[in-house]
Image: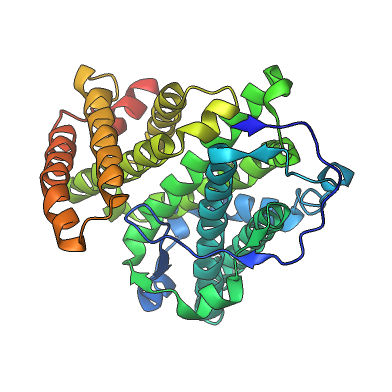
Amino acid sequence: MVISPPKPALEISATKTKAIKENILTPRFYTTDFETAAKMDLSAQDTEIQAMLAEMRADYNRHHFVRDEAFNQSWDNITGEARQAFIDYLERSCVSEFSGFLLFKELSRKLKDRSPVLAEMFQLMARDEARHAGFLNKAMGDFGCTMDLAYLTKHRVYTFFPIEWVLYTVYLSEKIGYWRYIIIYRHLEKHPENQFYPLFRYFESWCQDENRHGDIFKALLRSQPKLWKTWQSRWWSRFFLLSVFATHTLTVHERSDFYRVLGIDPTEFDTEVIRKTNETAARAFPSTLDTENPEFFSRLRRCSDLNLQMSEIDRTSQPKWVKVLRKLPFQLSIVGNLLQIYLMKPIDAEAMRGTVL
């Protein structure tokens, strides 16, 4: 990133609406089976769920997401590729938070008369996600672009996930979000010279929301024995872990400029986030991935390298069908590497918990 000397305050005459570049790494919008969700028996985790509900009602961060005077300046001194990398980071984060808001809001609405406790929980989580998305969208406005969230609501394609998949994936999304935010926050505490924008000061409270949401989904997941007591649950746990970790690795290395501006090595950051998330998931999932296997990260990095090579192909002026053919070997190689990771001997998290106890 190039940071030039500050220019005089510059008025942005027209704020453009940011269009989403669709690809496999773009955050999706989801819907689910509301009837099945309404019938879930939560009694096995009732104490935990009631405790989490009390925390959510307390709304500890209700005064946190308020922009202060530090935002009131021009950000035209942030230029070049890194400016675009930061905007892309804000865009993806905003869409991800807004996606969560829409899913939680719809779950709350559909469960209101069927499962009041669950409906209130989703309503309160939707409140948090809306704050996050709105805060990020205002940050994008500082860089001359915003997301039209109302348009997204009406025109995005919604992907159906069974409620069981929602519990797995949202749990992981919230927990990996926690580790991403807290690692960046702690790094910038030690290196304030790299904190080029005030948003990062909010990451500590932000990650508290992420962690709290993750704990809620852990309680929901553990209330359903079929999601952690069956052999199928062991396969699904590892599948969703690998999906989230692969997406994280590819995304971080696509945005390497952004992390380097923060003084963070992208590969080291990716490794730490994945290891911490995998360790955390062992408290909820029956099975986790062996991140200490020498081939685990080497194969993930190989996938990232192949993905970057495909991005280079996309930037050429060749016909679309030529690009598709050229990318096919890379795609097959990525699938092969991910399959090799998936088939590695897993960690039996249930046995580990029993040993600790």
Q: Using the image, determine if residue 321 lies above or below residue 301.
A: below
Q: Position of residue 91 (x, y in %)?
A: 55, 54
Who's the residue at 19% across and 45% down the image?
Answer: 235
Viewer-proximal residue among 286 and 195:
195
Q: Using the image, determine if residue 355 lies above or below residue 281.
A: above
Looking at the image, residue 90 sits to the left or right of residue 110; the answer is right
Q: Which part of the image, by quadrant, shows the C terminus?
A: top left
Q: Position of residue 176 (x, y in %)?
A: 47, 40
Looking at the image, residue 76 sits to the left or right of residue 221; the answer is right
Q: Using the image, determine if residue 125 lies above or below residue 257.
A: below
**Which residue extends farthest right?**
69
Looking at the image, residue 256 sits to the left or right of residue 241; the answer is right
Q: Position of residue 56 (x, y in %)?
A: 67, 55
How many labels, in total? Answer: 0
Who's the residue at 44% across and 24% down the image?
Answer: 272
Which picture quadrant has residue 12? bottom right
Q: Position of residue 108 (x, y in %)?
A: 55, 73
Who's the residue at 25% across and 44% down the image?
Answer: 310
Which picture quadrant has residue 285? top left
